[in-house]
Image (spheres, helix red, strand yellow):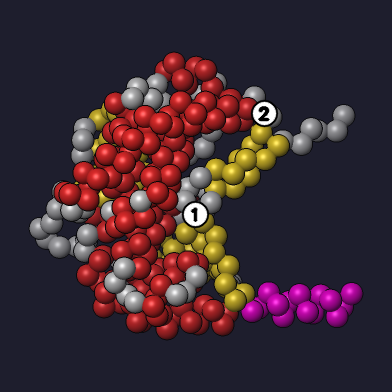
């Protein structure tokens, strides 16, 4: 037993973990998509977790995000308030891979500095593009992410548009189809589930809202193609998607299933709730 415990401690020392809340992850993911087309094979050939950590480390070096260290854990965040959320992206890397991410971060830093100027509207220039603030409730968020995932799977070139900008546009299209309601202004929007759907599923608030910022940076022609692709997807798939999401949320509110975890794309993965023993 002592030998096994010793080996476990040695193995644990060879692993480092990054914890990233969703607002910071959205920015890092958008930068990853931006760099994939510009940084060459030395960057694109790496696994996504290694690329993600390299971007976070580079942003830390640039002073764009903050970190908190706890043992072999590093927490990355733009705003300290992010760490109050219950859901968090967790990336586990061997220490050797982490060191390679450090080297990769230095390689991408010059390109990253340029991309950071527009990512999520968080640039520090005195004059810049208008920043849009968005908040989406869990039901609309899951539906929007599903639509975006299918559209970009069919049209990978549309990933050149930052995902935050894509999700905001999908919400606009969902509103036009009567399955999302926007309150606030265009520059500060909150997207919620219509009352009729909310009543059917027993409530959309089964997790925290998604919040992010973005600036409109997509090329007009490419953005028009994305809009058309979303409209086509919704005309073919909305009824099926809506029925599926309503079923999941209803079962969750009835206590039959629970959110097992949230993947890096923000999608819920469900699991059965074990019956308590009498």
Q: Residue at x 55, y 48 (%)?
A: 262
Quadrant into which the C terminus falls: top right
* Residue 275 found in image quarter: top right
Give the answer, above or below, for where 223 lies relative to 193. below
The residue tagged 2 is 255
Magenta run includes residue 10: yes
Residue extending farthest left: 127
Estimate the x, y position of residue 240 in percent, counting from the top left: 49, 29
The stretch in magenta equals 1-14
Residue drawn at x 20%, y 39% as measured from the top left: 187
Q: Residue at x 67, y 28 (%)?
A: 255
Tell me where residue 137 appears, x and y as whole percent: 42, 34
Task: Give the overall secondary structure of the magenta segment.
Answer: helix
Residue at left 76%, top 36%? 274
Residue 245 is situated, as x and y percent measured from the top left of the image, at 52, 31
Q: Position of residue 119 (x, y in %)?
A: 27, 59
Question: Which SS class for mark 1?
Answer: loop
**42, above or below 230, in the image:** below
Distance between the Cα atoms at labels 1 and 2? 25 Å
Q: Kindly report which numbered mark, 1 or 2, lies closer to the viewer in this rendering.
A: 1
Say what secondary structure mark 2 lies in: loop
- Left or right: 120, with 7 as reference point: left
Residue 47 visible to the viewer: yes
Residue 168 visible in the displayed image? no
Task: Give the class, few, some or many, for how many residues have Cα within 10 Å of label 1's Cα (few <14, many ≥20).
Answer: some
- Residue at the disc numbered 1: 264
Determine which quarter of the picture holds residue 121. bottom left
**Residue 184 in the figure: left or right of residue 105:** left
Q: Is residue 139 magenta?
A: no
Q: Is residue 183 left or right of residue 28?
A: left
């Amino acid at each position: 037993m002592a030998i096994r415990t010793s080996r476990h401690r040695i193995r644990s020392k060879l692993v480092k973990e990054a914890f990233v809340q969703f607002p910071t992850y959205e920015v890092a993911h958008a930068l990853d998509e931006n760099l994939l087309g510009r940084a060459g094979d030395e960057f694109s050939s790496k696994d996504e977790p290694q690329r993600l950590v390299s971007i976070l480390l580079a942003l830390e070096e640039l002073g764009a995000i903050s970190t908190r260290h706890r043992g072999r854990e590093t927490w990355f965040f733009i705003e300290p308030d992010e760490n109050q959320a219950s859901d968090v992206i967790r990336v586990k890397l061997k220490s050797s891979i982490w060191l390679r991410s450090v080297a990769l971060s230095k390689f991408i830093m010059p390109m990253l500095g340029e991309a950071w100027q527009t990512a999520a509207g968080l640039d520090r220039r005195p004059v810049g593009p208008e920043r849009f603030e968005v908040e989406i409730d869990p039901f609309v968020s899951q539906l929007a992410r599903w639509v975006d995932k299918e559209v970009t799977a069919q049209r990978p070139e549309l990933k050149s548009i930052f995902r935050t900008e894509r999700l905001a546009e999908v919400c606009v299209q969902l509103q036009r189809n009567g399955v999302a309601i926007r309150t606030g202004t265009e520059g500060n929007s909150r997207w919620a589930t219509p009352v009729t759907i909310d009543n059917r599923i027993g409530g959309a608030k089964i997790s925290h809202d998604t919040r992010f910022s973005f600036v409109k940076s997509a090329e007009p022609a490419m953005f028009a193609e994305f809009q058309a692709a979303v409209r086509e997807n919704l005309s073919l798939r909305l009824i099926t998607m809506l029925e599926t999401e309503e079923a999941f949320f209803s079962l969750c509110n009835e206590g039959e299933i629970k959110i097992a975890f949230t993947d890096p794309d923000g999608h819920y993965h469900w699991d059965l709730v074990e019956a308590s023993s009498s």
